[in-house]
Image: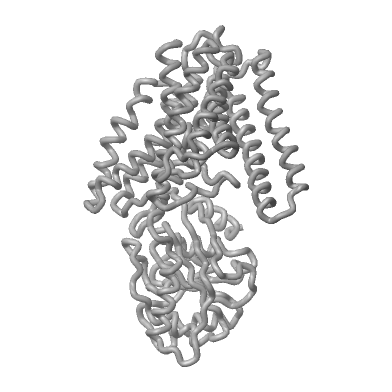
Amino acid sequence: MLRPTAVFLTKLITGANAQWVNCPKDRDCLRIYFANHGSHLDFATLWAALPAFARDKTRPVAARDYWGKNAFTRTIAIGMFNSLLINRETITRKDNPIEQMAAAMREGNSLIIFPEGTRSMDGQMAEFKAGLYHLANKVPEAEVVPVYLENLNRILPKGHLLPIPLLSRVVFGEPMRLQEGERKTDFLLRCRHALESLASPT
Amino acid sequence: MIDYASPVTRNLLSAIFGVLIIASVIGYLLARKAKTDSAKATVSNLNARTKSWWVMVLVLLGALALGHRGTTIIFAFISFFALREFLTATPTKRADYYALCFAFFIILPYQYWLVHTQWYGMFSIMIPVYAFALLPILSVIGGDSTDYLARTARTQWGLMVCVYCISHIPMLLTLPIPADSLRMGSAGLVLFLVCLIQGSDVLQYVWGKLCGKRPVARVLSPKKPLEGLLGGVLTASLLGAAMHRLTPFSPLQAFFVSLLLCFIAFFGGLVMSAIKRERGIKDWGTLIEGHGGMMDRIDSLCFSAPVYFHILRYYFT
């Protein structure tokens, strides 16, 4: 009951229009969706824009220090959106977020991650953190799909609670893979460019 | 609001549904005849348009059947969808957060509340005076001066065009026009405007396709030819004269009022094209299949509705 409500509410608030550019919508395979990050609505919107069969086995990756704070945020993150909560502050060998994500993928889940690590204030894309590379390296069979999220930072900017009912767009780009012997910085730069190329020229 | 016993009502409804049924039958026959891919695409676009016309007519007639309150609510939603498209297409900044919140959650509902309570004095100044002063104040609190004038102007324009202008349509139902001069009831005033302006749009398109050569505004909207404008506006004005029983106008008055409204509507559409062109978009949205967004449908009503309202209010009440 929580999940369909979450999908309906998200689509109502963000008026999201999904566009699939060179990306097969109905392919049933393991994927790492990565997107630009400007709003709390990002993972919900991306998740709601997926076709139902893919949504059922796609988990947004969220920060435990934020979303695991109390029962309410945990219910939203886990109960509604099936999020995978990871530790982004104290990383130990035992509590390694990459290992945790790879384990979830080995169970057959696709993931939604935000390689900038945090929400941007002004819609500019920050440097990508290395997690995307390490994950792609650990799960080489997964497709890495860039997803550009437009306007969500205007609908619900960082630091505000009430969404403004503007329309957003979710643009899925061509699936990528980590190439044999590709260096970390090269791969991250390639991913960033793929994401930037999906932004409409305004 | 609608006098169903009046023969004027019967004639208008037969005309509207007659046109729609004929268009649907023609579309159906064309779809069966179309062989090439491009012909199929054209016909399926035509049929999507006809289908959306059915929906729009049924929504409008449903709203009018519900009286003043129902019509006010439906037009409030039309304004909401239009404002949403307008402000999505025109960039604002993080510092405009509170201005945008006020535009959507306070100013838009309050304007339609004023339509509901029929407080004409406040209705006519709330957005142009108070919202005009309030929005830049809310934006300036954000402390960001980049593009400040352009940003505040965009929010203000969105409210003027999508909310203020459009709210004059349900306000037509409150005009104290002597009842014996309105043969269909006050709903006829709304139907006259909508049928005239949308008819003019369609007729301009038809005339343009038949004999269009010279674009009126090559840069802004190369697909709108002068022949389409003149032919469309003249035939639509004849249509307006034929519909004069919906209004207090005589046939000749109806013709000249229609002529004026159609020209204003044309230039209203051209203004909206200029904005779309500046933003580099083709349609405002994807709400109505085959027709773009809500703004694409109502752009020609925005400027003509207040003029029509004031002609009626000044000369006929």
Quick one: quadrant of the C terminus of chain B? top left
Q: Is residue B178 left or right of residue B141?
A: right
Q: Position of residue A111 (x, y in %)?
A: 52, 74
- Vertical placement of residue B98 versus B163, above or below: below
Observer-nearest of B284 and A8: B284
What number of labels is visible?
0
Observer-nearest of B218 and B293: B218
Q: For the point 53% across and 25% down, which residue is it?
A: B234
Q: For the point 52% across and 67% down, which residue is it?
A: A172
Q: Is residue B31 left or right of residue A27?
A: right
Q: Is residue B237 left or right of residue A27?
A: left
- Vertical placement of residue A18 versus A24, above or below: above
Q: For the point 35% across and 68% down, which residue is it?
A: A125
Observer-nearest of B60 and B223: B223
- Vertical placement of residue B194 versus A74, above or below: above
Observer-nearest of B266 and B223: B223
Q: Position of residue B231 (x, y in %)?
A: 54, 29
**Colour mode of the rendering:** one colour
Q: Position of residue B24 (x, y in %)?
A: 72, 38
- Vertical placement of residue A150 versus A105, above or below: above
Q: Is residue B109 visible?
A: no
Q: Is residue B43 visible?
A: yes
Quick one: quadrant of the N terminus of chain B? top right
Q: Position of residue A18 (x, y in %)?
A: 54, 60
